[in-house]
Image (cartoon, grey):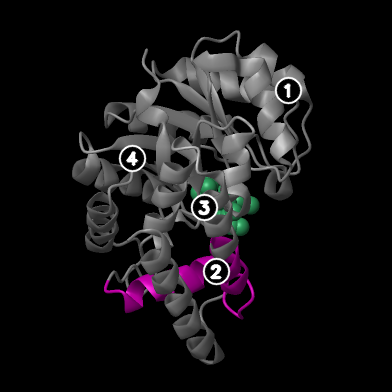
Amino acid sequence: MTLNKFHGIIPAFYACYDDQGNISESRTHALCDYLFEKGVQGVYVGGSSGECIYQSLDERKAVLSYVASNLKGKMTLIAHVGAPSTRDSIELAKHAASLGYDALSAIPPIYFKLPDSAVTKYWSDIMEATPLPFIIYNIPQTTGYTLTPALFEKLLTNKKVIGVKNSSMPPMDIERFKRVGGKDVVVFNGPDEQYVAGRIMGADAGIGGTYAVMPELFLQANTFVLAGKFEEAGQLQSEINDIIIALCSLKGSMYAEIKEVLRLRGVNIGSVRAPLEGVAAEDAGPIADIMKLIDQAIEKYCG
Ligand SMILES: CC(=O)N[C@H](C=O)[C@@H](O)[C@H](O)[C@H](O)CO
Ligand SMILES: CC(=O)C(=O)O
């Protein structure tokens, strides 16, 4: 199987709500159209950025359907199917497979601290449910579970495992997973704040929660890395980090602020679901400044 379709810039898809906070089909299409127009290589649907953890199974299935009906055949589609129980994860996995998704992915089980044997069984059971390739999702800061390179190596004996999306902070973790996986495995950089470092340390691609609010900048960072222009890539990364830190420093959650930026850009996908906090009145000034930072960086680096 060619892994090329998993390379490039793959934004994490945001939850799109109507003004009452229900999943919105039309707003989901608006986000699909916007990302297609930006030229990203794929989308990662129903992950952290998709607020999966706050949605019912039916809502998550609906989102997977809406996105596939819009973007299938136009870019790579990855379905995040991690859920509290194996049973729900399998239901989502089968649904995604029926819609023609290119790959599945899942966080480890959450809430209870489970041993490696249970985590392995969870991922294996999902993989067994469909013929789709699978991307392990390692995100210790939200799940409390840390994937080791040794366990990753064991998991790779299942040929459905084609990669890992690594969101732990040390770029060395990326390097270790790539070391174990080699060229036939795709390692995705998780932390957007060190996309460039992750790529240099061995990540083949990136999946990120802030890509969709500034796709131009991440596409350009990818172009710089591929061209070996590491100084430019590093400078652009610094400007991206100013933007991310600003997005995370306001009253509303990062996703609320990102959605507000998108709304002001003409892509209204609603707000966030509680307990995530929405945008506050006092955020308006800083948001205008953030939009300027994004525009200036696009002008400077993407000309
Ligand atoms: C912890 C977390 O959610 N990490 C995301 C996924 O890897 C990132 O893409 C972040 O959204 C991004 O790096 C901003 O902090
Ligand atoms: C990458 C990310 O933010 C997600 O899991 O949706």
Residue under the image location 75 percent in, 37 percent down: 145
- Kind of residue indicated by mark 1: Pro
Confirm or reject: label 4 Cβ below 8 Å from ligand 2.
no
Task: Find the distance from the CA under tag 2 to the CA under tag 1.
Answer: 32 Å
Task: Find the distance from the CA under tag 2 to the CA under tag 3.
Answer: 17 Å
Task: Find the distance from the CA under tag 2 to the CA under tag 4.
Answer: 22 Å
Query: Badge 3 is on which residue?
Result: 232
* Mark number displayed over residue 225: none
- What secondary structure is the stretch in magenta mostly built from? helix
Mark 4: give few (<14), some (14-19) or many (20+) Cα within 10 Å.
many
Query: Badge 4 is on which residue?
Result: 41
Q: Earlier in the sequence, mark 1 or mark 4?
A: 4
Span highlighted in magenta in the image: 240-266
Task: Find the distance from the CA under tag 3 to the CA under tag 4.
Answer: 22 Å
Task: Find the distance from the CA under tag 1 to the CA under tag 4.
Answer: 27 Å
The number of numbered badges drawn on the structure is 4
**Percent x, y of residue 165:** 57, 35
Residue 154, picture quadrant: top right
Q: Earlier in the sequence, mark 2 or mark 4?
A: 4
Residue under the image location 52 percent in, 58 percent down: 236
Q: Nearer the viewer, mark 1 or mark 4?
A: 4
Q: Earlier in the sequence, mark 2 or mark 3?
A: 3
Instruction: For the residues labelled 3 and 1, say whether their Cβ atoms are less than 8 Å apart.
Output: no
Give the SS element for disc 1.
helix
* Mark number displayed over residue 243: 2
Residue 144 higher or lower than 5, as above or below: below
**Percent x, y of residue 82:** 54, 38
